Amino acid sequence: MRFDEEFFNLGYIDRLSYKETFIHNIDARVKLVIVILYIISVISYSKYTVSSLFPFLLIPVLFMTLGEIPVKFVLKRLVVVSPFIFFIAIFNPLLERNIAFYIYGIPINYGTISFISIIIKFVLTVSIIIILVATTSFAGLCYALRYFKIPEIFVNQLLFLYRYIFVLTEEAMRMIRARDMRSFGKKGTELNFYTKLAGSLLVRSINRAERIYYAMLSRGFNGTMPYNRKREANIKDFIFLFAMLLILFFFRFFDPVNIVGKFIERII
């Protein structure tokens, strides 16, 4: 059943986040700082910058390699969300028609350059976020957000969403299985049925949410979610942070592509 497959795939990223690799063992706060600075560095370039963005691809590749994250896993999720940014950027070549340069007689306008730049920035920023989630437990990420003084209510909402999305999906799977057993997979597939299914799932979710809330209150919940840290940040974390900051600084302010290009020109 397709829904069953998607349900079990939902926990795949959670299983990835609990692996034991070099990147997984880096403190979540360190990784969060690196990712935020990485995103800021990438999006700080102008919309007509293309070549200077390519060196930043090395950092997601490094994280995937050290974290043993399958490339297919990252690419699949990039493809899922890519239509949103693609249909936004696709209009740039039509809106900015001024010619920037020619390639073998083919005119390239500024809109095409900005379109390519937006796509590259999208790939870099979204891939690093996917890798961050795949190499850090969600509880660890929420602890890092709390450490940096993100409002408690926002962090709690993220924790509840992540925890009970599996419960909600399991409930939906039971309802669909019941439908299939009663119709042998042939009836009840029309839009009207799925509308009723969504309504029934909403009612069940509200009822379960109330029961869960009262159960939490009976166990002493006071608005703060407890979190047990596995370990404190150590010297390895700080060395890794310092090294990544140096790499980001070099990529952003020294333009390695330009340096390599000038070096090749001198040799030739």
Image (cartoon, helix red, strand yellow):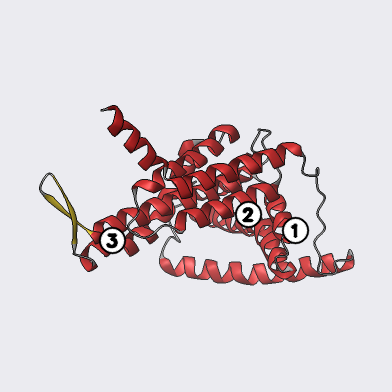
- Which is more toward the observer, 110 or 90? 110
Label 3 neighbourhood size at 10 Å, few (<14), some (14-19), many (20+)?
some
- Which of the two discs, 3 and 1, labels the residue nearer the N terminus? 3
Residue sitting at x 38%, y 50%: 120
Q: Are marks 2 and 1 in contact (CB under 8 Å)?
A: no
- Which of the two discs, 2 and 3, labels the residue nearer the N terminus? 3
Number of the label disc, if any, that sits on residue 170: 2
Type of amino acid at the residue the image marks with label 3: Ile
Residue sitting at x 18%, y 53%: 101
- Return the x and y of residue 7 as percentages of the image width and height: 57, 49
**Residue 165 shows in the view:** yes
- Return the x and y of residue 125 as percentages of the image width and height: 48, 52
Number of the label disc, if any, that sits on residue 86: none
The residue at which mark 3 appears reads as 90
- Which of the two discs, 2 and 1, labels the residue nearer the N terminus? 1
The residue at which mark 1 appears reads as 147
Q: Is residue 7 left or right of 222 when viewed as pictured?
A: left
Furthest residue in direction top, as rendered: 267
Is 186 situated above or below 266?
below
**Which image quarter is the C terminus in?**
top left
Quadrant assignment, res 227: bottom right
Label 1 neighbourhood size at 10 Å, few (<14), some (14-19), many (20+)?
few
Q: CA distance from mark 2 to mark 1?
A: 32 Å
- Which is more toward the observer, 205 or 28? 28
